[in-house]
Image (cartoon, helix red, strand yellow):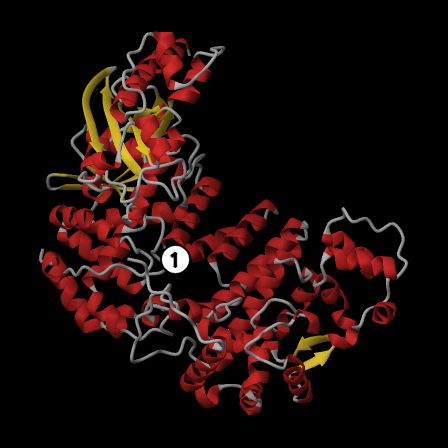
Amino acid sequence: MRPVQVLLPPTYYHTHFREMMAFVTGLYGDGLGLDEREFMARFERLDEAAQCLYIRMVNRKTQIFRMRDLNYPEIGDISAAMDTLSGQGFVRGLEPEDYRACLEGMTKPDLVRLAKAAGLPDMRSHWSKGDMVAYVHDLLSYDDFAETEDISACFVPHHREQVGFLLYLYFGKLGDNLIDFTLRDLGILSVKARETHAARFDSVDDARAGYFYRQRLSELKAKAIDLHPLAAQIETFPAALSDHSQGLRDRLLHRLGQGFEARKDYGRALDLYGRAQGFDSQERRIRLLYAQGAVDEVKALLDDIMANPAHDEAYIFADDFYNRKFGGKRTGVLSDLLRSGRTVVVDDLYRGYPEAGAIQALNAEGWRGYHVENALWPALFWRVFHDELSMAPVCNDFDPVPKCLREGRFHLDYADTVAVKLAAVRDGHIADILTPAVPPDQEDGHLWDEVIDAFVASAPPYAVATVLEALSCNYYGLRDGFPDLVLIRGDEVRFVEIKAEGDQIRRNQLARLNLLKSAGFDVDIVRLSYRVDPQQTYVVVDVETTGGRSIYDRVTEIGAVKVRGGEVIDTWQSLINPKRPIPAFITELTGITHDMVRDAPTFDQLADDFAAFMEGAIFVAHNVNFDYGFISAEHRRIGREFKFPKLCTVASMRKHYPGLSAYGLAPLSREFGIDLRGHHRALNDAQAAAGLLALINEKRMSAQIVA
């Protein structure tokens, strides 16, 4: 059944803009500045055509608009609407300060034409647009440009600052336009309307400060502003009135400090770092001071951090730095912890899949491993506190995360129910209060059912409650750095951070390990060592399909051969109903007809069985990206992930057996005496590819012994 196509009205964007303005006015009311209130009042006095044209213009990144480029059939008379906007002060004509932006808005052919018309020598059409703009701007004055081009048909929208600030009040970030409204109305973006909304900012003045700092940060990132004049204006920067604006101010000061440090202006960098309250700037300041020999000042700063740490990472840094520089230790706590971790050997093919390799190796010790990283605890938190989170006001319907959670006030705003639920968790009754809710950023949250059920059944209740309580106080501060794996074996639960060769443990990861350990969990660091494992399990797969494009075509048959220790230990095969006709040339190639698959199971009916067959294995195929790509596409269609290490028998045979005349499955089978009957049927081809795998692994093992 095809989805119903939603047709938006021609002036949908006009409705969206007015909805945004009404929402902001309703939340902030008289707290809005005079500029914003005057803008909205004057906007309301425009006729609808002029309003639509203005919205069209300010909703684009373009700064300069030419009449010839404005083509909006729903508006009607564009010229009349532009005259209204010009007469009411919503647009203005081109001025000298717009010159470069006007050039940047021109196409390369337009720039070539302009240069030729102005008689500029040596302009080349193969130049980059940036070079063309710079060349014309440097050699052609604005007055000469105005004589060459018809600038009377160029317009610049006024009041972008007011519109940008209104959007910032609504979305809380720069660069947002009205696209989310459109996606909502089309049914693409799921929105759950709330009856009550919380103002995103404590005051309009605080929002204005945040808007200022975000603008400067954006300009620095785009290299659209110079460090020196911006740093010279620090004393005039708006006051930070909340954690929100203070955090942005700290980020700006840190970026400025980094810029001056990169230029070796260490005095200015130290001054900027010293003005910031953020830990990143504290750390850079301490490192710079130590490099300059200011030992006593460094010790005092480290003592202050250890006495009053802003968070665990800050304490870990200060303690580690003090011990290494002044305590006689040559290595820090991070290095010590990493060295204390045990080493687990996994097959070399797990490079790039370290978590899967570790899980496969630890399964041999009786552990059931899950790759959870930063998803387990948020998922559990939302399931425990779903009722409270669903009632808590959000800043708008596009922002499903409650404001109190963003601001670290959840434990205060819902203190009574949080206390009751945490007590239930400590008493071992967490299963009684869990809901099927998932965090807004975990659309595949249903896949966590097995993990969470297994975890809460085995995890120590007091430890679980301790971590949930920490999240209730600082959800966003603790949202990353959690260990890669959770291991479950009977009533045992262990969290494990996986480190492949060359990996280093970060401070936030160490802090989460400390949090879990202090809560009562067993934690560990496992380092991986890669080699060819003769007992590794492989599943050699072949698929037959309705065509060659995994995006459009479907699987009609899967054949799979499981190999361990060089021996075939199991096979798996099934025809699959592709839910579409099989082309005649495919039937001629494979022998698979529509009648053969009509009553076969569909892929979603086989997915669990195939996943169980694949568990803990390396995916092998001849031209592996073809088979892997089709099976991955089938999994995506049913909302599931398919992720396994891969080995390609074509690429591997080319590597280990170079110089052969052909590397197709049939010629390789003939070359090495491998039985291949019924070519282009899935199981037959998979069995032949398994024979190639045996040859490849002989070479891999021999190379390892030699090394």
Residue 114 vertical position relative to residue 700 in the rendered view, above or below: below
Q: Relative to the observer, which residue lies in front, 354 or 320?
A: 354
Q: Say which quadrant the N terminus sits in.
A: bottom left
Residue 462 x %, y %: 15, 54
Please count the marks in the image: 1
Question: Do we see residue 135 in this rendering?
Answer: yes
Q: Relative to the observer, which residue lies in front, 241 or 208?
A: 208
Residue 170 x %, y %: 45, 75
Image-based side of 96 in relation to 623, left or right: right
Question: Do we see residue 533 in this rendering?
Answer: no
The amino acid beneath tag 1 is: Ala
Image-based side of 411 in relation to 60, left or right: left
Residue 488 x %, y %: 17, 40
Q: Quadrant of residue 109?
A: bottom right
Image-based side of 76 in relation to 1, left or right: right
Name the residue located 73 percent from the left edge and 67 percent from the top edge.
102
Residue 579 vertical position relative to residue 67 in the rendered view, above or below: above
**Residue that badge 1 annotates:** 307
Residue 643 vertical position relative to residue 534 in the rendered view, above or below: below
Q: Relative to the observer, which residue lies in front, 290 or 422?
A: 422
Secondary structure, mark 1, is: helix
Name the residue located 76 percent from the left edge and 48 percent from the top edge.
127
